[in-house]
Image (cartoon, rainbow, N blue to C red):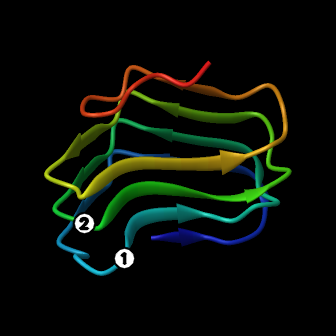
Amino acid sequence: MLVQVGNFVTVTGVTVNGFSNGNGILIGGGVSNLTISNCQVNECATGIGVVSGNGQYLSLMGNRLAGNTTALNYGATGGGSLVRNNIGAADIA
């Protein structure tokens, strides 16, 4: 799943499996006001990837990231984001 550009996007309850050479969910560097919650991402190279950039107000909470080579790759440099309570990945303050 790719969210390359945009604002005020919500992704809830999605299951992504088996992208062994890529990201289960990839968020572009300029995306803001995005919520990804209650998703399951399994057996991918990277479970959830956030491209380096000025994305802000991202909420990545309550997801299950299992069996991924890298559970979470977070590169956003903007403020106001919450990355918490994801099973299989540490919180980012």
Q: Secondary structure at mark 2?
A: loop
Q: Position of residue 91 (x, y in %)?
A: 46, 22
Q: Quadrant of residue 81?
A: top right
Q: Secondary structure at mark 1?
A: loop
The residue indicated by pointer 1 is 22
- Quadrant holding the N terminus: bottom left
Q: Please say whether residue 57 is visible from this viewpoint.
A: yes
Q: Quadrant of residue 21?
A: bottom left
Q: Nearer the viewer, residue 9 or 68?
A: 68
Q: Please say whether residue 10 is visible from this viewpoint.
A: no
Label 2: how many residues lie within 10 Å, few (<14), some (14-19) or many (20+)? many
Task: Give the residue drawn at x 13%, y 52%.
Answer: 67
Label 1: how many residues lie within 10 Å, few (<14), some (14-19) or many (20+)? some
Q: Do the CB atoms of the residues marked 1 and 2 lie less than 8 Å apart? A: yes
The residue indicated by pointer 2 is 44
Left or right, 32 with reference to 84 = right
What's the distance in space between the residues labelled 1 and 2, CA to CA?
6 Å
Kind of residue at disc 1? Gly
Q: Quadrant of residue 31?
A: bottom right
Q: Position of residue 64 (x, y in %)?
A: 25, 38
- Quadrant holding the C terminus: top right
Task: Give the residue drawn at x 22%, y 76%.
Answer: 20
